[in-house]
Amino acid sequence: MASGAAERVTAAVLIIGDEILSGRTQDTNLRDIARYLGTFGIDLAEARVVPDILPEIVDALNALRARYDYVVTTGGIGPTHDDITADAVAAAFGVELEEHPEILAMMQARWAGELNPARRRMARVPKGGALVKNPVQGPPGFTIGNVFVLAGVPAIMRGMLQDVGPRMRPGAVTISRTVRVEGSGEGAIAAPLEAVARAHPAMSLGSYPFYGQEGYGSNLVLRGRDPAEIEATVAELVGVLKAAGIANVREVEAS
Amino acid sequence: MASGAAERVTAAVLIIGDEILSGRTQDTNLRDIARYLGTFGIDLAEARVVPDILPEIVDALNALRARYDYVVTTGGIGPTHDDITADAVAAAFGVELEEHPEILAMMQARWAGELNPARRRMARVPKGGALVKNPVQGPPGFTIGNVFVLAGVPAIMRGMLQDVGPRMRPGAVTISRTVRVEGSGEGAIAAPLEAVARAHPAMSLGSYPFYGQEGYGSNLVLRGRDPAEIEATVAELVGVLKAAGIANVREVEAS
């Protein structure tokens, strides 16, 4: 660890939903959560996608919450029979579900005589849990222990997320810079890249090739927590690549 | 199980790459693989995203390959120092990596005097493995046991995938139909939906709400393997929803 480096804070994402595993729905929540947590210096360390099957959710949640500082779940908190996330979280923590008085009051105000049993399911929170604000539409999410339970609909998930970060212990923010190489393959880039990576073990250097209508090449991503070292490493990498005869090299905004 | 139902065939996807977990890259491979496997009647049952850290890849791969019929991995098979998937797969299977003569011959033809050590890394395949054709660009993927190891770049991954399905044992294809409800929330839909779901335990009925500029409502997805039962269930669901006073209901192409 470099001097002054803060302790690493980690999180995992658990995506709950048959619609992701069937390929029907393209998940975008993982990327949104990763980027959001990054602004608090929290590293997303693992993600899992599980179906709407109670023991599967319970097992994955227990594995992840034991291993990482935080877990964020998405999906399965609506009123229909396939929405079983609250049941699974309660089972994982070994507690009962109870109707949260604040959600029930909101619902009574909103639905009055139309507060049917299905809607009322959404008032259930595991005993000991607290609410996560929903500024968008519908009932809130909740949190218990180190787990945050959010909606699956992206617009609602993003709204709820705003109430999550401030409740986490922040880490040192990782800074990311991107050096883009066009018209050279990774085979030519690999040796100079590895030399720079070896000289800076506190940093993470990755190569992300692209290939398609935009041509081919690679985005070299440098990540670290020390601004001075990152600055120096970007310059070093550009110099080493050019010295290796790779002409089309430039720093770009993260793409 | 309904009479004539084939055995369920399952797969998991293991996405390997810091760039997905950092939020830099939006994964699309999971959805493409899920849809592709679906055409062979193979159910994607779980997915995980892990960083470019060898023991993490090994542990996840061993957990998934023990549990599901097949595992498809994406990412980490390039020539740079952060490409460690082949090493991890070899470690998971407890075998050595060896240079595959066919890949080496391709590379010698392609690169001749420029076949540097980095490019040569991509010729390494775990002992006992076989190749997965790459019709797009660069060296092939490989398969060992029940694991298929593909590139992370989407265009290349999709190309390799064409050589995967025919090598898997097919299952009974799941048929999916979508009934779209607009202007009614899930709270109103839940009871009729659950009644239909209970009457058809061999089918899976899910509700996927939408909310945004397009308005709000829910896509009700019916999935099953018996064409006659699916047809009947779609009609039953539409009838039950209309009887419950939900007016804006229609079947749509899967969206």
Image (cartoon, coloured by chain):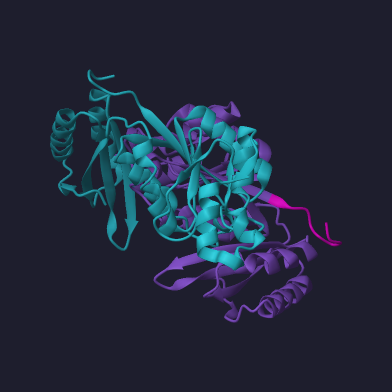
Chain colours: A purple, B cyan
* Quarter location, residue A113: top left
Nearer to me, A9 or A194: A194
Please state the extent of the stretch shown in magenta in the rendering: A1-9
Looking at the rendering, in which quadrant would you find the N terminus of chain A? bottom right
Nearer to me, B108 or B54: B108
B195 to the left or right of A58: left
The residue shown at (39%, 48%) is B161
Q: Main secondary structure of the magenta part?
A: loop
User: In the picture shown, does residue A183 fall above or below B18?
Assistant: below
The residue shown at (42%, 55%) is A154
B46 to the left or right of B251: right
User: In the picture shown, does residue B172 fall above or below A16?
Assistant: above
Instruction: Verify whether residue A190 appears in magenta.
Output: no
Where does the image place residue A121, in percent across and percent down from the top left? 40, 35
* Quarter location, residue B246: top left
Nearer to me, B100 or B45: B100
Using the rendered image of the protein, determine whether residue B123 is visible from the camera's viewpoint. Answer: yes
